[in-house]
Image (spheres, rainbow, N blue to C red):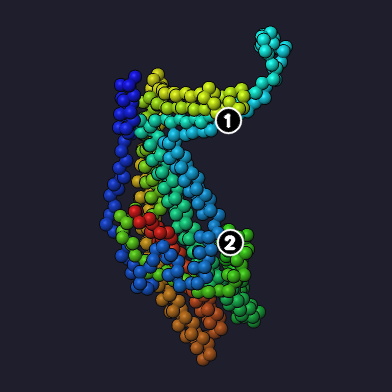
Amino acid sequence: MQRFSLSLMALLLSGCAVGPAYVEPDVGAPPAFVEGAAAEAATVGGRSVDLVSWWRAYDDPMLGRLVERALAQNLDLEQAVARVTQARASLRGANAALLPSGEISGSAAELYQSRETAQGRIASALPGFEREAQAYDLGVGASWELDLFGGKDAARDAARADWQASAAAASAARVSIAAQTADTYIAIRGLQARLAVARERETVQKQLVDLVGLQYKAGVAAEFQLRQAEGALAQASAAVPELEEQRDKAMNALDVLLGLQPGSLRGELAAETPIPAPPAISGAGGPAALIRRRPDIIAAERTLAASNARIGVAMAEYYPKFSLSGLLGTATMNAGGLFGGDSVQAAGILGLRWRLFDFGRIDAEIAAAKGRNAEALAAYRLAVLRASEDVENAFSALVKQRDRADTLAKGEASLATARKASFAAYKGGVASLLDVLDADRRLLEARDGQLQARTATARAGVASFRALGGGWEPPASQ
């Protein structure tokens, strides 16, 4: 018996971890983004931007306030934070499973024996029988399942990785909420600017219809010219409610992002302000740094680590489970003798549980754990690829939309010059008012296109910051 105890103690002290050791996968990342240099050249301003609070660099106080409010009030983010709390609680439970558990129990009972039961009839025939009796007991118990083969330790590692993954997912939600808020706000400012142009186009087109109508009545213009002008007016007028609908939907979406009832921010956003221009953007260290910075990639990597640890949990089922239990207490029929020496009782138990004839099911559990690990590995690699895709797409959009906006700005300037020339010719009697109004219409159409391109450029800047993982502070260890 002594030899067995020594062997058990040696096994307890040495332990035996099962399962594969986790090694973070190496994904070959290129040294730089394809569109990185072009994106840096396309943005406004030369100073570098702090990715943690990039929205402040847009130089729009209302944009900054709205993003900060969204990060404080958004309900999706609140759910993500609650999931972190749940995962942290699971980790505490996994830590506690490695420790002994104990309890204190006690009872006091008043008994009254029936004479009509079999037990009561036998007992009542004995000398000194009393129908009334008392029973008291008090005890302290403890139990401990020994983690000799590392199953519980692996479960704790899995719970820790799950908690870290949930924390990274909450940070990813923060990145997403900040970007969605800024993107929606910029879309609203762009729609407001386009609405002003659309209403001006409608006014100009009405003047054209009135003028062509007068010429038609005077026999100078043909009917098809009048109908064409009326059709163009209908198109210009129809654009106004469509843009108003888009603006209202964007405002409602912004309200929900801030955890408010739709319509709450209409008053604050009623006054038109310029479309914010994107600040300077850099590749932030390239694809290799992106893997360390983007919280969704970190979450995917931690999920992979958790699935690897659960292979060890499944493999630990091959081995026996030993447990130690003990009880120390007193039991008596007399309250006065509860702490007397004769009432003391004690027990010690060494338990064994071994799924000795269940290895087929254990094999299936291990195979399933390895399958989930392979799935998590593929998900991690895909997350890395999609992150790089997000950055490349955002940088490409930033470059191309900026080029488009510059081109349309040149066209708008040319049409503005043409409009001045037509108005001067009209004053000199060389051109008609119809020529002036037509020049106004073309100029407003070009201005609308240029506003769309400027809005798309600013939104591409937001998408770039989001793709780079801006909006949170990565841990120092990352």
Q: Quadrant of residue 278?
A: bottom left
Q: Amino acid at mark 1?
A: Gly
Q: Nearer the viewer, mark 2 or mark 1?
A: 1
Q: Position of residue 275 (x, y in %)?
A: 49, 71
Compare residues 465 and 476 and report the one nearer the observer.
476
Q: Is residue 59 above or below residue 165?
A: below
Please tell me how crowded label 2 is: few (under 14), some (14-19), or many (20+) other residues with Cα within 10 Å. Answer: many
Q: Position of residue 413 (x, y in %)?
A: 44, 79
Give the side of residue 68 with respect to residue 260, left or right. Answer: left
Q: Position of residue 139 (x, y in %)?
A: 53, 29
Label 2: state its secondary structure: helix
Compare residues 170 and 317 and report the one nearer the observer.
317
Tag shown at residue 255? 2
Q: Quadrant of residue 31?
A: bottom left
Quarter of the figure that contains the C terminus: bottom left
Label 1: state its secondary structure: strand
Compare residues 371 and 331 and report the one nearer the observer.
331
Tag shown at residue 106? 1
Identify the residue shown where x is 29% and y is 47%. Answer: 26
Q: Amino acid at mark 2?
A: Asp
